[in-house]
């Protein structure tokens, strides 16, 4: 009998509870073993199967042969002057993706990626410029949160409950999460599961450019907060900025959003609106937008445009952004302006491009349990 290689081993990190139970059942074990494993991985941050001491010895020995807890390798870590951190993670084959941690007084938000690159071609987004490389796996998506917990926990170790460092997870890194539906949904299940990361459903936000059929599907599958990249108050302008609008227009998109809320008993959808100087930031745009969303369960989040090399767009002046907000608020809308964070390390919205400038990969983890973490 030959020993299983790392590639043949199942990554336990990508398995939601039901699948983990099926996995241990296949090994002839009881379902409670799945709970024990989740406890080790998500509550205690343990990545070494041999260290999971309350698992029966035989079971553990077999598990080491068949499974591992593997996370993406960190290629580079950067800390911005405002405390925002960005990690470049390896997707293998010289490709990379990014995650960003944004600390605030009352919360800590982890912004994760769902794909390497993106196929949607929004005209103002730097990720779009690199095109689409591949979907991330569930394990790579969950692995981001696991890694961030591990690193941010530092000496004090894993933190959960009231002391948790990551209070919010947003799919606002690289990629279109609804274009990677099959991997994203199980990841969300693990984020929400009380045996998993146990994050409340209102604190896990999926942001989409508007893949309408998948919004309907999502409503049937999981219960998390929804953010939608609107960026324009009419189809003509939106089709230029967010090309998927040519396939699914604003009316269809809004219909899908209200359906999502109905199904989920949700309170509101957050509409993201990037502020592009002279393009979509005029008072008439605000008035048109107000008509569209007035009396609807909607919140607006205005995002000052973050520039990147080669972009033809400029950020709207702050005064224009405030005026735009006031126009909307006067018409009864709930509006916030997103603080720009981490822009000195290109960690702000739309600046994630997976550049791999430093290809040195340092492995500190032990090969026996497949952990390759550089903390
Ligand atoms: N694909 C998802 C997640 C994208 S990133 C989506 O489209 O929603 C999260 C947000 O950042 C989106 O609203 C996106 O449109 C916005 N964004 C993209 N590029 C930006 C830029 N250069 N400046 C500011 N926001 C940007």
Image (spheres, helix red, strand yellow):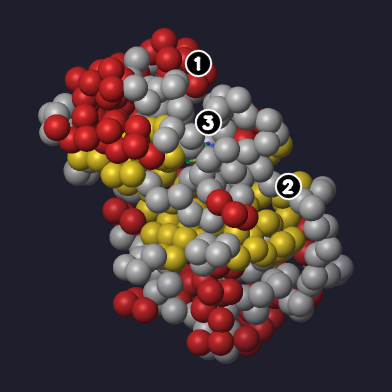
The answer to which of 38 and 277 lies nearer the viewer is: 277
Which label number is shown at residue 314? 3
Is the residue at mark 1 in contact range of ligand 1, meaning its CB lies under 8 Å from it?
no
Label of residue 240 in the image: 1
Q: Residue at x 69, y 47 (%)?
A: 354
Residue 110 appears in the picture as rendered: yes
Q: Earlier in the sequence, mark 1 or mark 3?
A: 1
Q: Report, in whole angstroms, how far the alpha carbon at label 1 lies from the one at label 2.
A: 26 Å
Q: Are marks 3 and 2 in contact (CB under 8 Å)?
A: no
Which image quarter: residue 371? Answer: bottom right
Q: Tell me if mark 3 has few (under 14), some (14-19) or many (20+) residues whose alpha carbon lies within 10 angstroms of its own.
A: some
In the picture of the structure, the residue carrying the numbered disc 2 is: 355
Q: Is residue 364 left or right of residue 274?
A: right
Gap between marks 1 and 3 measured at Cα: 16 Å
253 left or right, relative to 127 = left
Q: Between marks 3 and 2, how big is the CA–CA gap? A: 22 Å
State the residue at coordinates (61%, 50%).
Answer: 346
């Amino acid at each position: 009998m030959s020993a299983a290689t790392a590639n043949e081993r199942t990554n336990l990190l990508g398995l939601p509870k039901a699948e983990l139970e099926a996995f241990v059942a296949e090994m002839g074990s009881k379902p409670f073993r799945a709970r024990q494993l989740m406890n080790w991985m998500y509550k205690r941050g343990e990545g070494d199967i041999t260290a999971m001491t309350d698992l029966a010895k035989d079971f553990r020995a077999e598990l080491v042969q068949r499974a591992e807890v593997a996370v993406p390798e960190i290629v580079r870590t950067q800390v911005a002057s405002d405390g925002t951190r960005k990690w470049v993670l390896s997707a293998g084959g010289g490709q990379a993706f990014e995650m960003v941690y944004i600390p605030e007084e009352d919360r800590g938000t982890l912004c994760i990626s769902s794909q390497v690159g993106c196929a949607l071609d929004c005209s103002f987004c730097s990720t779009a410029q690199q095109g689409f490389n591949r979907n991330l796996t569930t394990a790579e998506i969950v692995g981001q949160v696991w890694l961030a917990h591990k690193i941010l926990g530092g000496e004090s170790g894993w933190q959960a409950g009231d002391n948790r460092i990551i209070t919010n997870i947003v799919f606002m890194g690289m990629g279109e999460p609804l274009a990677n539906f099959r991997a994203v949904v199980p990841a969300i299940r693990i984020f929400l599961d009380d045996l998993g990361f146990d994050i409340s459903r209102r604190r896990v936000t999926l942001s989409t450019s508007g893949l309408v059929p998948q919004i309907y599907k999502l409503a049937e599958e999981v219960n998390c907060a929804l953010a939608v990249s609107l960026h324009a108050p009419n189809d003509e302008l939106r089709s230029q900025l967010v090309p998927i609008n040519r396939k699914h227009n604003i009316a269809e998109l809004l219909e899908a959003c209200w359906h999502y809320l109905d199904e989920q008993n949700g309170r509101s959808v957050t509409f993201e609106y990037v502020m592009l100087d002279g393009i979509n930031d005029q008072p008439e745009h605000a008035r048109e937008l107000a008509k569209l969303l007035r009396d609807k369960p909607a919140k607006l989040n205005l995002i000052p445009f973050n520039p990147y090399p080669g972009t033809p767009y400029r950020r709207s002046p702050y005064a224009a952004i405030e005026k735009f907000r006031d126009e909307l608020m006067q018409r009864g809308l709930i509006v916030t302006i997103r603080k720009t964070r981490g822009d000195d390390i290109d960690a702000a919205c739309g600046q994630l491009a997976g550049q791999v400038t430093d290809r040195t990969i340092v492995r500190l983890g032990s090969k026996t349990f497949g952990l390759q973490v550089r903390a």
